[in-house]
Image: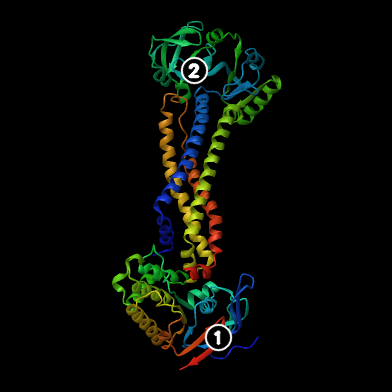
Amino acid sequence: MTPPSASALLEAKALTREFDEGQVKALRGVDFSIKEGDFVAIVGPSGCGKSTLLQLLGALDRPTSGTLLYRGISLPDHPNPAAYRAREVGFIFQAFHLLPTFTAAENVQIPMFETDRSASERRERAFELLKLVGLEHRLDHFPSKLSGGERQRVAIARSLANEPSLLLADEPTGNLDSENAHSVLDLIIGLQQEQGRTMVLVTHDPTIAGRAGRTLRMIDGRIVSDDKR
Amino acid sequence: MTFFTVVIRGLWRRPLRTGLTLAGISIGIAAVVALVGMSRGFEKGWQVGLKARGTDIVVTNRGGSLTPKPFDASVRDRIASLPHIAATCNLLVEVTSVEESDLMILSAREWGGFAWNNLELVSGRMPRDATEEAVVLGQTAAEVLKKKVGDPIQIETKQLTVVGIVKGGALVEDGSVVLSLPLLQGIIGAPNQINAIDIRVTPSTTEQQVKELTRQIEQLVPEVRAVTVSEHLSHNEGFRLVKAMSWGTSLLAILVGVLGVMNTMLMTVFERTHEICVLLAVGWTRGRIMRMILYESALLGLFGGVVGVAIGAIGVQVLSATPAIRGLLQPDLSIALLGLSVVIAVAVGISSGLYPAWRSSRLNPSVALQAG
């Protein structure tokens, strides 16, 4: 195994992911290294493997072969992937994935159950985060009573619940109108830059990718270009 | 918000289905409480009745049903002289229909025997002698049969007269029609036949000596069984049958409850696949997901158990007041039985939640989130 680069937060080598006993090859040998604090966009056409790659980075799935390291630790062999997801990673999904039977404030508290925070600390932190995303007046609203933009803001607040080092965003503005998409994107990028987090954002929109410091272009399960600005 | 809030919210997601599942468990637990409470009450009632008569040992035929098979009255003469026996009383007890009542205890007692002594007159008088065609009724029996002193009463083919109403100090005694032994033997055409001998031991007899006495009686008359009052009912096949039937029916009710909760929890896991995957994605451990599902099913069991105990307790009170059963038993709704029923309900909840919980923890978040 190649030793990890000194400053790499994430490092992938010859990463593959196959489905249906090898009939579908979503990733065909991916290599990259992402440093702490980077904002990386992954672009490419539908089905090129970018969402699969994001799932692997979030330890939601395991690669078929290859190496994937987080701070030098192999993610597929991580002793506690749930703890990794809870404490190190914040997910922002295209479809928001809020829990419909919980209010905005409660949705934000959900990831905090895996920490030592007390119930009152969880409530307080949820309030702070919702304030941060401009939704302090929507604390007790259920997702069904929120607009698309507001739902995604709640999801952003949730992703920051446990102060993760790594934000993984999968088409975060894909389900929003252009006005909301713009403000949500500004919010995400603002939070990433202010707090110095690492962010990997999957998109097929070149304008969004243009705001990232680095763009990995994928086609057919491979990275075909790596542009840094 | 606490973890408990998450659990409650899960149950509240589909109130109708949760309600129906609760109803299912409640009915099952109500059946347990009612059936077991009734059978225990039945047993206890007879035991208290025997104690009220001052009986220490009961001698009956081996085998038999709720009321033991008759045997010859001369058996008493063979055992009466054994040590520690203070008094004996021959009895012929039938559970039969009397006029409008389908289940009535007909208790024929040896004239002058100690089994008459606990009967306290409320009105009227006792029969004058062994041959007077008269009965006394326990208070409840009088109410059930709607009889007062002076009324005629039809026993089998013979019309007798109610000469007194008595209190017997126990439910079974109060629910009995009491008459002299020769009278009933004559009516049913079984002279010299009895089906029980009540034995009272001398006051200083130890428990060990009572045990020894029962052994001696059985040695002397091998065709009979002699048991202490507390053992009497556990040896009685009729009572054992009642007990087995009540527990058997209860087990069926519990099994239906288990299937109901399991079905609900499996449905809930299938329906909430997406939600569970989100929880996994935001870092919930598989253990916490399993706990969530198990707590939900345990809570279903707990609520169902509490409601079921309430329904069962009310149900048996109503049942025991019906004319068919009144006077025969006082349901035994001990705290232990009610507590046990709730424990059973929670156990039903937890055991039914195990498989759904395991299923939920095996979900792969990536697949569901990609689809969503």
Residue A67 drawn at (x, y percent): 61, 82
Circle 2 packing at 10 Å, graded few (<14), some (14-19), many (20+), is some
Frontmost residue, B360 versus A105: B360
Task: Compute the Cα span from label 2 to label 1.
Answer: 92 Å
Circle 1 packing at 10 Å, graded few (<14), some (14-19), many (20+), is many
Q: Quadrant of residue A90?
A: bottom left
Q: Seen in the image, is B280 located left or right of residue B147?
A: right
Residue A28 drawn at (x, y percent): 60, 81
Q: Seen in the image, is A43 located left or right of residue A69?
A: left
Q: Chain of mark 2?
A: B
Q: Residue at 65%, 23% (x, y): give it.
A: B62
Q: Chain of mark 1?
A: A
Dot 1 amino acid type = Ile
View extreme (bottom): residue: A229
- Residue at label 1? A223
Q: Is residue A127 above or below residue B96?
A: below
